[in-house]
Amino acid sequence: MQWHVMHIGIRPAPPRIPPDDLSDDAGEEARDDRAAGADDEPPETTIDDQPHLGVLPNWEPHYGFEEQTLRLNSTTPENQMLMYALQPCSAATALFDRRWIEAAKDATLTLDTSTRRMFPAGRVIIGVDPAFSSGPRSSWFVAVVVLFVPQTKTAPERRIVLAMKRFRGLPSVEAQGDILRELHHDWQAEWLAIESNAAQTYLASYAEHTLHLPVKRLFTAERDADAIPALAHEFASQRWTIPWGDARTQRGLAPLINELVEYPAGTKDSLMAMTFARRVYYEAPAKKTGAGMNVASVTW
């Protein structure tokens, strides 16, 4: 038997160059090729080229090495993991269970359409966490409007977030006072629960004596450390309702949701404002009018 061998034309592989034979010329050619294609790639963008992202809290040119070191050493281990190691808050260490937060969201309510007449009779109290400095390093000014609906024979007690204002770097006490006056006008709040420690007392005095708003001054200390855990217990009991019905509402209340998810890491200004309203609800009796308690009428 004869075998017929078919020859297939295959291009021979180029000779392999030993490493010792690689010259500087070959390296320069490779570098030239990469340089020629560099114009086709988009330029690298750094954070300095994106001013719309805002001022970073630990930006070296603004704060310097010493202050950044002080911040790192003085914050909690949870914040170190969140801010410096870029590790998200763990659900295992969070005080507010994600299921409680989701249960509090009400997709039928929006900030633009909510009115007092939509809800059962209750007391409206505005919790206020003032800001006492301006600029990119200032604290947040937060005011949360809360409707407290008492328990009835057929319905449990409820707390409903009606509105929230949150700003950073407000230039003056007058600007903060204008926001409080507008919120009081819109919701006819029974009290404005304003934190009044140190420099924060200026806002309470201005709101009470110049704007003639009903102010309750609150002084916080270490004994108030259980305020937010008590708030968490109420979320666990499904007492809180947060409007979540449209995109604008979700944008407006997203900072509050973020604080709930991230606590004890991150900021807590919105949570503190809620605890102030809650504290006055328990400590201050309801105001009386000629018709009885100063509450909203029931309309369904």
Image: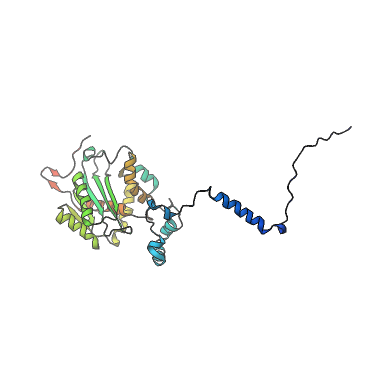
Q: Residue at x 25, y 53 (%)?
A: 128
**Quarter location, residue 81:** bottom left
In the image, farthest residue toward the bottom: 66
What quarter of the picture does the N terminus occupy? Answer: top right
Q: Is residue 24 visible?
A: yes
- Quarter of the image with the C terminus is top left
- Farthest residue to the right: give it: 1
Q: Position of residue 130 (x, y in %)?
A: 26, 56
Q: How far across and how far down the image is residue 189, in percent?
A: 19, 47
Q: Nearer the viewer, residue 110 or 21?
A: 21
Q: Farthest top residue?
A: 1
Q: Quadrant of residue 68?
A: bottom left
Above or below residue 175? Residue 63 is below
Residue 158 image position (x, y, % from top left): 27, 44
Judged left or right of residue 248, residue 208 is left
Residue 73 appears in the picture as rendered: no
Quarter of the image where one finds residue 250: top left
Q: Is 50 positioned to the left or the right of 148 in the image? A: right
